[in-house]
Image (cartoon, coloured by chain):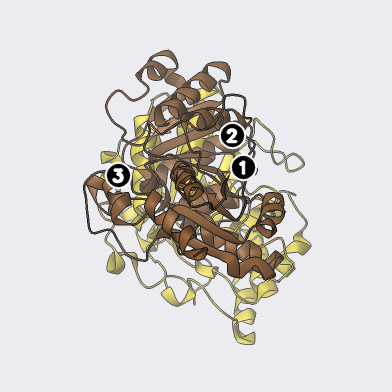
Chain colours: A yellow, B brown
Amino acid sequence: MNNKLNNEALNIKLDQRSKTLRKLIVRSLIGGGKGHMGAAMSLVEILRVLYDDMINFDPKKPLLSERDRVVLSKGHGCLALYAILVDKGFFPASELDTTSQVDSILGGHPEHAHVPGVEASTGALGHGFPISVGIALAAKIKKQKHKVYTIVGDGETNEGSVWEAALLASKHNLSNLKVLVDYNKIQSYDFVKDVSKLEPIVDKWRSFGFDVSEVNGHDIKELKKNLELFINNSNNKPSVTICHTIKGKGFYFAENNPEWHYRRSFSKEEIKKFDECLR
Amino acid sequence: MRNTCLQTVHDLAKKDSRVIFIGSDLGPGVLKDFRREKPEQFFMEGVSEQAIIGIAAGLAMEGFKPYVNTIATFITRRCFEQVALDLCLHDLPVKLIGNGGGLVYATLGPTHLAIEDISILRPLPNMTIVAPCDSVEMKSLMKKAIDWPHPIYIRLARGGDKIITKEEENFTIGKSVIKKEPGDALFITTGTMTQIALEATKLLEKKNISCGVMHMPTIKPLDHDALSFWIPKVKKVITVEENTLMGGFGSSILEFCSENMQFHTPKISRIGLRDKFTENYGNHDELLEKTGLTVKTLYEKVLNNFK
């Protein structure tokens, strides 16, 4: 990993837009009283760049045929997806206050049947990426122009199904497929390096036939540049971007702290700290 | 039966460009004409059952009609979570074709036998399970399955199975077929256990016991109407399946009776595989013999009830 992607480099200040999206995530966390906080905060900028600058979508027609597809394979990061979908008008912000409650459309993992804009029901890991390969293959067969983006967690790549899908994406030259690995270096139990070694992660993906790049996953300009290269590429390979991120990004007490992968409850003190960090 | 099934997929693919065949790592030359004629609809994706089910789901989300084919136990045990979530949770019209349901791959041992595929798929919401008895029924089924809007598991038997279905019989998903009208007793069967049951009824006739056969090629959803109509008319009911007795076809009949016609539940007995892995090899018939799935077993089970 080069120095531009170390923790110090990732420690960039959040702008107002990133804070606004995080406020929506906090709204869900408080609404449900629990949730995958750290896992959502690390991927905000990835989703922001996709929906702000890259993808074609219509919130009034979530199943529009020409839309670009975004599949959140790491379904436990769904609070960030809910935030961007609300921000873009797929459903009202008031739904966030009901997150995880018994009659809510918003669960602890995203469901296609309930939430407008959610392409696939994910949560069990290693599912969304293979589904995305099928979606990208379908587009290739039908000679459709849209792109398929799938966001995979680093811990998720422990799953064998991820590598099965990688082999097949490569076999079919799915150049319309972009995998974005949210490389926040922490999984449920502990740091990824202490649970199941992923490094050398770039070499692994490259050896599976992917066009591989690395970016600072919180740097809007870098992310945008990286995705523009993908959209304009002319090679015939599937593509992966290793997005170096910080779990719990934006909240000093949660950053790089495995305790904040998932929280069952929040104290008044912690809720106060959420607000302080987003001022 | 397998050839008929796969050939029908090829025929359907010629007429409908949305039909996609996905095999795992099947034998050399399987569907080679299909591959040559329609390469854009034919995929052989390697020993990757989990990813294959996910990919089939993705294709179905985009309007394709995927048919996934591999050995029955690998398409059920190995990728169970993908079948449950990618297919059933999304309720997608993907067809799973399982080769060698039951004890067919006898020689290959317990790693290759599908002794509980029915039991593990039955509890999945939105899943349909069919087990036809011969190639004629298979052909008819395949023509219906193409437009079935839910995931469906098609359990193949050995192949070369005795034809007991008439060409004019019109297969309907969810409907049973009375192969022989009952008198005193009734076998309720699925798959190729129907042929064995029909043979057993001939022996019973010689003992003046009139026993019928209700063939249920659709295991889920069950044909409630037929069960409600026929079970009260007989003294004894015996279910027969080439699957474990735990949670399988016979269990589903017991569950139905327990909920809907409790008075008749005591008359039901089940024949199927015991709660153990097989310990023998040999050929399919030899393993059926070892596990008691024979004409003699069926005959004796009924006879003992009428002594």
Of the two numbered discs 3 and 1 on the same chain, state the one appearing first in sequence. Answer: 1
Chain on which label 2 sits: B
Residue beneath label 3, please?
B284
Name the spot of residue A244 as percent of width and height, x first.
40, 55
Q: Residue A168: horizontal and vertical position, in percent?
A: 37, 36
**Distance between mark 3 and mark 1 Cα atoms:** 26 Å
Q: Which residue is drawn at 46% across and 33% down?
A: A230
For the residue labelled by badge 2, is the local secondary structure a helix, a strand or a loop? helix
Q: Marks 2 and 3, Cα distance to the nearest angstrom? A: 28 Å
* Mark 2 neighbour density, 10 Å: few (under 14) some (14–19) many (20 or more): many
Q: Is residue A127 left or right of residue B220?
A: left
Residue B3 in picture, x, y percent from top left: 40, 26
The chain identifier of the residue carrying mark 3 reads B
Distance of mark 1 from mark 2, alpha carbons?
21 Å
Using a 10 Å C-alpha cutoff, classify the residue at mark 1 as few (fewer than 14 neighbours), some (14 to 19) or many (20 or more): some
Q: Mark 2 points at which residue?
A: B145
**Mark 1 = which residue?**
B178
Give the amino acid at mark 2.
Ala
Q: Please identify the quadrant where the C terminus of chain A is shown.
A: bottom right
At 73% from the left edge and 43% from the top edge, which residue is drawn? A59
The answer to which of A54 and B21 lies nearer the viewer is B21
Q: Nearer the viewer, mark 1 or mark 2?
A: 1
Answer with the quarter of the image where residue A154 lies.
bottom left
Q: Residue at x 58, y 71 (%)?
A: A35
Closer to viewer: mark 2 or mark 3: 3
| Kind of residue sitting beneath label 3 | His
Q: Helix, strand or loop at disc 3?
A: helix
